[in-house]
Image (cartoon, rainbow, N blue to C red):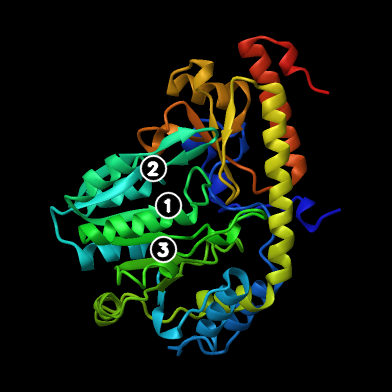
Amino acid sequence: MSLFDSIVTRDENCRKHGQLQQMFGTDDVLPLWIADMDFKTPEPIIHALRSVVTQPIQGYNLDYPHWKTSVTQWYKKRYDVDVNEEWLHFVPGVIKTIVLSLMALTKAGDNILTCTPIYDPYPNFVKTSGRNLIQTGLIEENGCFKFDWHDFREKLKTCKMFLFSSPHNPGGIVWDLDTIEKINRYCHEAGVIVISDEVHCDLTLPGKLHTPFFTVNEPLNSQSIVFTSTSKAFNTPAIQGGIAIIKNEELRHRFYSFLDNCYLAETNSLQQAAIYSAYTHCYDWHQKLLSYLSDNVKYVKDEIEKNCPLISVVYGGASYLLFLNAEKMQLSDEQLKQFFVHDAKLGLSPGAQYGPGGEGHMRLNIGCPRSVLVEAMKRLKKAYQHKMGSTPECEMT
């Protein structure tokens, strides 16, 4: 039995369970939506957090010892790349700091480019910050997404910044080196700053290779900022915080000075302790997690292919999020949501919330014990056969 097979009772404040009524209009669904895992946070991280909160005086602290060194060692061990500690800065959270980068490096009225479909906060905070949202549609092909390079380059001409999700959310796409290099080259030619959100990078499964964006930008002296965090791979999203990596000296000085002079990224001992512990003491746990998630992905893909032939899976090798394409069911987005909620009694994230290209899709979180997924697939099979009719392809073996 794997340590990830255990059913863990979630706290009453857990959003995954506590917001069911708000999100789905009912509590009677299996929650497989918001992007956290139903696995215990690694014990070394919990131990480090306890050591912080049990200090008799919770006063102003210096940086948690060696947190930057832990990041450089992690990148060397996992990605075989060298990171200079000078490139690193603690940040108050990935999404928060993407917003801060908009405020610091662009001005109101500037055009900001994103892909679509894309993690839904991106369009929201671009518009709310007074910038203009420009989107380039990804092409879905053979269970994956790829760029429309002509459209991408044309839209870059009017933009100041490109918000890049790498790996992609909601598609879990691990972008290949050719894609990363083209984005880097085209953005450099257009004078566009790249913000590479790599919060899911440490969930790249065996057989795929994530390329940190900063590893390809030196020859062109391009301007890019990589943001990452332990929140997804080590299940610590309740502890807000993250890491910025900027290789370009001019951009690094410009952005980090903004953060420091505005007191926006002061020491957070809890999150820095989590970073240090995750990257120093949790490598073996992390390897076992990736193996378990890989088996979960295979199980769900096999079950859907076998039992629900009009649903296909978009997944590119990273994260615990699968993007289900149900367009062939020929249901409206509202009908599709009702099918999953009321017929299958599953709480998934509607694909339409991720923008154009997400219609007819649902995002499924497989970061949970296998027994939960077995129940989910039983519910989906039963609802699918009732809705679409039983066919030879739908018989379970």
Query: Spatial distance from mark 2 to mark 3, Cα to Cα?
Result: 24 Å
| Residue 206 rendering spot, x and y as whole percentages | 67, 55
- Mark 1 Cα shell of 10 Å, populated few (<14), some (14-19), many (≥20): some
In percent of the image, x 54 and y 32: which residue is there?
A: 142
The x, y position of residue 254, in whole percent, is: 24, 77
Q: Which residue is mark 3?
A: 94
**Residue at disc 3, secondary structure:** helix
Q: Which mark is residue 179?
A: 1
The answer to the question of whether label 3 and label 1 lie on touching residues, with beta carbons closer than 8 A, is no
Distance CA(mark 1)–CA(mark 2): 8 Å
Which residue lies at the image location 50% right of the left edge and 62% below the top edge?
Answer: 211
Report which quarter residue 46 is drawn in. Answer: bottom right
Tag nearer the camera, 2 or 3: 2
Task: Give the amino acid type for the residue marked by disc 3 in the picture.
Answer: Val
Foreground of the two, 277 or 305: 305
| Residue 92 x/y as whole percent | 40, 70
Q: Amino acid at mark 1?
A: Thr
Pointer 2 residue: 147
Residue in the foreground of this view, choosing between 80 and 48: 80
